[in-house]
């Protein structure tokens, strides 16, 4: 089950539990005072349990919006960097490779300018959801800002990641074809390319821009 869903259920149950415990406290208080208001106490128990449930729901929503990009419904930058720090630590301890992928949309500005921001938002949403829906279980994606995304493949070589991203790229390009938008990406490996994850990001970013430039060159040559 998705970790965020489990956490949300925990928040709801915690709120419900707090309401129930509070209600039990009221029962104990009234009983200790020799007050016999069974109906009133039953209503208080119900009201406090319901209130506790809704408090749990509010906590769940606050947690969700704090970690989720509201437009694309995937990890926001903060969530992504938190996850990345954890998997980098794990990779160091287990001496495993992981691949970082930088993803950027081609022709997105033109799409936004000519078709409008609502369509641009739709393109971002479709991109994010198509990527997220085609990742292996332990991989994750986040929106870093604008039309820039990043994917992390844990315990994965650069060659393996390249194969996976190529398959995902084809699916994203197919979904975005009607908007004349595609994606470019670059891949770098931790720790093979660098043991500094900031450097790995930079290398992946450079590789992504190299792919974008190669596409532009082909377009010019074919025009």
Image: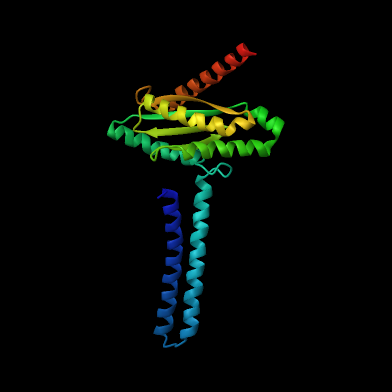
Residue sitting nearer the eye, 6 or 34: 6
Farthest residue to the top: give it: 221
Residue name at image x 51 percent, y 68 percent: 51
Instruction: Classify residue 89 by image quadrant.
Output: top left
Image label count: 0
- Quadrant of the image for the C terminus? top right
Q: Judge whether 207 appears above or below 87 on screen.
A: above
| Image position, residue 199 (x, y; %) | 43, 24
Instruction: Classify residue 217 by image quadrant.
Output: top right
| Image position, residue 42 (x, y; %) | 47, 80
Residue name at image x 49 percent, y 36 percent: 131
- Work out whether residue 115 can be spotted: yes
Q: Judge whether 45 appears above or below 9 on screen.
A: below
Residue name at image x 38 percent, y 22 percent: 193
Residue name at image x 43 percent, y 62 percent: 13
**Colour scheme shown:** rainbow
| Image position, residue 106 (x, y; %) | 59, 26
Q: Is residue 113 left or right of residue 5?
A: right
- Work out whether residue 146 can be spotted: no
Residue sitting nearer the eye, 33 or 69: 69
Farthest residue to the left: give it: 94
Q: Is residue 169 left or right of residue 86?
A: right
| Image position, residue 2 (x, y; %) | 42, 48
């Amino acid at each position: 089950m998705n970790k965020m869903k489990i956490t949300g259920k925990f928040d709801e149950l915690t709120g419900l539990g707090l309401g129930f415990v509070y209600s039990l406290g009221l029962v104990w208080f009234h009983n200790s005072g020799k007050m016999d208001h069974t109906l009133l106490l039953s209503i208080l128990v119900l009201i406090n349990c319901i209130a506790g449930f809704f408090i749990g729901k509010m906590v769940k929503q606050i947690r969700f919006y704090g970690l989720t990009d509201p437009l694309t419904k995937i990890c926001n930058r903060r969530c992504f960097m938190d996850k990345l720090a954890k998997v980098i630590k794990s990779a160091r301890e287990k001496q495993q490779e992981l691949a970082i992928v930088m993803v950027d949309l081609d022709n997105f500005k033109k799409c936004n300018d000519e078709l409008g921001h609502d369509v641009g938002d739709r393109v971002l949403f479709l991109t994010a959801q198509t990527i997220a829906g085609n990742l292996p279980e332990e991989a994750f994606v986040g929106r870093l800002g604008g039309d820039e995304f990043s994917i992390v493949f844990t315990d994965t070589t650069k060659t393996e990641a390249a194969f996976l991203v190529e398959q995902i790229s084809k699916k994203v390009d197919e979904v975005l074809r009607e908007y004349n938008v595609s994606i470019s990406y670059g891949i770098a490996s931790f720790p093979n390319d660098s043991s500094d994850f900031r450097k790995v990001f930079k290398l992946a970013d450079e590789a992504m821009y190299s792919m974008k430039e190669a596409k532009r060159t082909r377009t010019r040559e074919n025009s």
